[in-house]
Amino acid sequence: MRVRRSAPGRPVLRRTAALAAVSALTMAATACGGGSSTGDEGSNKNPGTLTYWATNQGSSLEHDKKVLTPELKKFEKETGIDVKLEVVPWDSLLDRILAATSSGQGPDVLNIGNTWSASLQATGALLPWDAKNLKKIGGKDRFTPSALAAAGAEGKPPAAVPLYSLAYGLYYNKQMFKDAGIAKPPETWDELVDTGKKLTGDGKYGLAVEGGNPVENAHHAFVFGKQHGADFFDSSGEPTFDKPANVKAVKQYVDFLASDGIAAEGNAEYAKNESVRDFATGKAGMLLWQAAASSLKSHGMKPDEYGVAPVPAQSADASGERAVNTMVAGINLAVFKNTDNLDGALKFVKFMTSTEEQKALNGTYGSIPPVKEAQQDAAFSTPDLKVLRDVLANSSAPLPQVPDESKFETLVGTAMKELFAEAASGKSVSTGTVQERLTEAQQQMQK
């Protein structure tokens, strides 16, 4: 698929949508907020029920319902509490949550992307997981430190508890590598570009990217920024989007399509896991993704057909923060503070973070249990998960746990989406162009 050509200029509708999301966050941050255990609008719930918003972890919403429904039936059988499940797509999840925090009409329990923890914590709508509440689910020592580090602002009780841990890895097609005479996966970005060019041709490309997905873009911007020695926020939480190193980081990622030519033009529109499909079906030889095993399987790709390596660095001898090759990715489980069934909600969180459920759910989704005891299961020692566990433990960093983090994802990620679109339409993406977009994003943050 090729991206549709458009007149020169910026996609105003996309920018307007991004700013609307930011405005929603600002409104939520000033609201007294909190969740409600009402289900559909205007309905009153029996105290013996819970509403749960789950995230789309599998290949489709229906797939998630099939995975979660029998697990929720176990909880219902154990407790007598009926759970009303809704799986919410990622492209609408943040807006749904923000609307719930400002209106007070939300679920009892919900999944959140762990990068949003501090932003949603700032609304005051989520139950703080202080020592008293953590004790009710077995205590904080059950969880890995890296997962807890992405659960809220430093010095405050977590806004949620870890449910699924994820890390980015470099997935590569073994047969495509063999056919191109490539002996091993790249360890630096220069090597990745060289490898990608060897794989590109005859309708195939070296790398699949999700250029139309602001959140995915922002995650890569963060990692590339770290590797260039920069952060997108300073120590006081002020945005530093247009620092030269961040400009260099964003340009390097967009250049995979813009100047390196190892990603297809159509990738500029990808926003719903199309890049995973392209990799699984042999249209691209490499993929940067979080725990992709379950999704690859759903597209018919067998585990022995691909390998997983750490995400490359700028140089082979990188150390410290310049060696960071993944954000601490994952899904956290939160409770709306004003639920009318707090006891039931706490029981539900305890159930979902129990060792057995952690094994079952993370095993199905191909993610890593943030509960340390569950990680000891042999199912999480496969070659790909060993790599992801290692990078999560040794070369990861949490996205900035500041109240405006989700605005960073929206604004910087959307700026990158626009840059991808311009590159796909044949326009040059210069350092100056990237600088201009990041300056605009920073100015929007400061309004």
Image: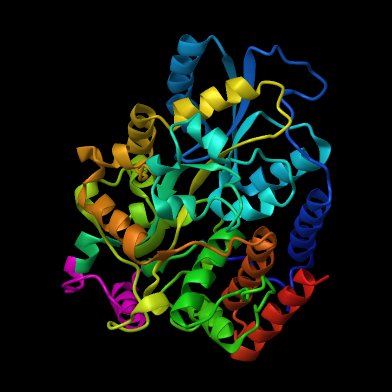
Front position in the image: 429 or 131: 131
Question: According to the image, what is the colour scheme of the structure?
Answer: rainbow
**Location of residue 116 with respect to 409 vertically, above or below:** above
Q: Residue at x 65, y 44 (%)?
A: 93
Q: Is residue 32 magenta?
A: no
**Location of residue 87 with respect to 279 vertically, above or below:** above
Q: Residue at x 83, y 46 (%)?
A: 31
Seen in the image, is 352 located left or right of residue 268? left
Mark yes or no: residue 277 visible. Answer: no
Mark yes or no: residue 221 visible. Answer: yes
Q: Residue at x 48, y 20 (%)?
A: 72
In the image, residue 129 lies at what x, y percent?
58, 40
Q: Point out the image quarter for the C terminus.
A: bottom right
In the image, residue 111 lies at what x, y percent?
57, 39
For the view shown, which residue lies furthest in the front direction?
A: 132
How many numbered marks, from 0 up? 0
**Location of residue 332 with respect to 132 vertically, above or below:** below
Residue 389 placement: quadrant:
bottom left
Residue 391 placement: quadrant:
bottom left
Q: Is residue 182 magenta?
A: yes
Q: Residue at x 22, y 67 (%)?
A: 177
In the image, residue 146 lies at what x, y percent?
42, 55
Seen in the image, is 316 located left or right of residue 123? left
Front position in the image: 341 or 435: 341
Q: Which residues are magenta?
A: 178-202
In the image, residue 317 lies at what x, y percent?
28, 83
